[in-house]
Amino acid sequence: MKLVSKNWIFNNLKTSLKNDSLVSKVVNTIILDVKKNGDKALIKYIKKFENPRAVLSNIEFTKKQLKKAYDSITTKEKTALKLAYKRIYFYHSKQQKKSYSFKDQLDSKFYVQWNPIENVGLYIPGGMASYPSTVLMTVIPAKIAKVPNIMVCVPSQNGKTSNLTLAAAYLCGVDRVFNVGGAQAIAAYAYGTKTIFKADKVFGPGNQYVAEAKKQLFGVIGIDLPAGPSEVLVIANEKSKASWIAYDILAQAEHDPNAKTYVVSSSKKILDKVMIEIKNIIKSKSLKNVNKSISRNCFLILASSKKDIYDISNFIAPEHLHIHTKFNKNLLKNIVHAGSVFVGEKAPVALGDYTIGTNHVLPTDQTARFSSGLGVDDFIKKTVFIDVGEKTLKKISKPTIDLARQEGLEAHALSVEIRKIKT
């Protein structure tokens, strides 16, 4: 945990997306093996990394097994899952796209058609750790987009997989669920095997091997984004509750030993209080991962002005931004780079991880400067149909021919010119 300046952050912020040569080599080996040997390679890596007793015939969960998992969870857990499902569905249903058509100033018509991606592969991290929330966050927008074939890969740990995760898959009505994780799951999605159908695009967070596999296979398969460790930036003022901020920081720090956490304020007094609170909570509570993430990647940033605060926030472009102040429209103008923004002291980021309705699959490592959180848009694609009218052809033929010849593309010009002569 460090108290630093704006300039320090601007000069020293490091990405987690840098290539690790060892990880890259291991992942490349797995990818090539799965590409060449399909199911044979797949089961080899499942046995090596997840379940030494695995057999190919039972790596897919049956619908009966998914229902059994759902029936096994408590009423309290079912209620929580259903509440989260309802809220996530409501928010994402507002993102639906409608196909449309229009005419230009002459006589051409354009038809813009939105269609779902046909086959998507969702990756749910975890093994014995339970991530039913990621099932909801990835499956629900895919369902709203009307994706016809939704597949899920979820890893196990010593052959055991979280019933809560499988219950969420049952609640969402997932088509197929495979008990496989790691880079081998992403490779199977990319190339297809006899067991796992080839996907057109893969979604969902994972460890560094999963992230590396997605990067290496981009182009063979579409990817959502190369997600890194979790991040949160809290903007605080002198009236903020230091203990609340400390818990906001620790809530994201416990995701991963490499999680990045930031507090920005123009008040050194509140930064000092937050530092003390974080240290006290770590001593008194048993929280996983926080000792490493806080010692390595927790930064308390002293800003000189409100403009400074906005500049720092937009530079970091955090996955999660929590602003400890009341909402005002100036925030919409000044905060332009962030995955999700939580406004007000009563808006903890953890709500976004589970039940507020927005998606928790978000851009990290400054990628919020050019990308957004997962949504229905990611599961659909746009095709444009152009019906060219005679008046339009007559009007634009000569400029088209001239431009083509300026670029030295004679066949382009002739393909238009021959139609112009016959018109």
Image: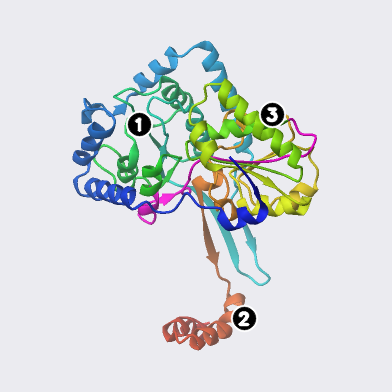
Q: Amino acid at mark 2?
A: Lys
Q: Is residue 421 above or below residue 49?
A: below
Query: Which residue in the protein does label 1 denote?
Result: 155
Q: Amino acid at mark 3?
A: Trp
Where's residue 187, x and y in %? 31, 45
Which mark is nearer the camera, 1 or 2?
Answer: 1
For the record, the magenta segment spans: 214-241
The answer to whether residue 87 of the structure is visible from this angle is: no
Which mark is nearer the camera, 2 or 3?
Answer: 3
Q: Is residue 220 magenta?
A: yes
Left/right of residue 348 with respect to residue 256 in the rendered view: right
Q: Is residue 316 magenta?
A: no
In the rendered structure, find residue 244 and report the number of the disc placed on it: 3
Where's residue 179, x and y in %? 32, 30
The answer to whether residue 93 of the structure is visible from this angle is: yes
Where's residue 153, x and y in %? 37, 34
In the rendered structure, find residue 379 and report the number of the disc placed on it: none
Where's residue 371, x and y in %? 56, 52
The residue depicted at 33 percent of the width and 47 percent of the height is 23
Q: Compare marks 2 and 3 and give the one earlier in the sequence.
A: 3
Mark 3 closeness class: few <14, some 14–19, many ≥20 residues within 10 Å: some
Left/right of residue 7 with respect to residue 258 in the rendered view: right
Identify the element where label 3 is drawn: helix
Q: Is residue 353 above or below residue 369?
A: above
Structural distance between the alpha carbons of marks 1 and 2: 59 Å
Query: Which residue in the protein does label 2 denote?
Result: 395
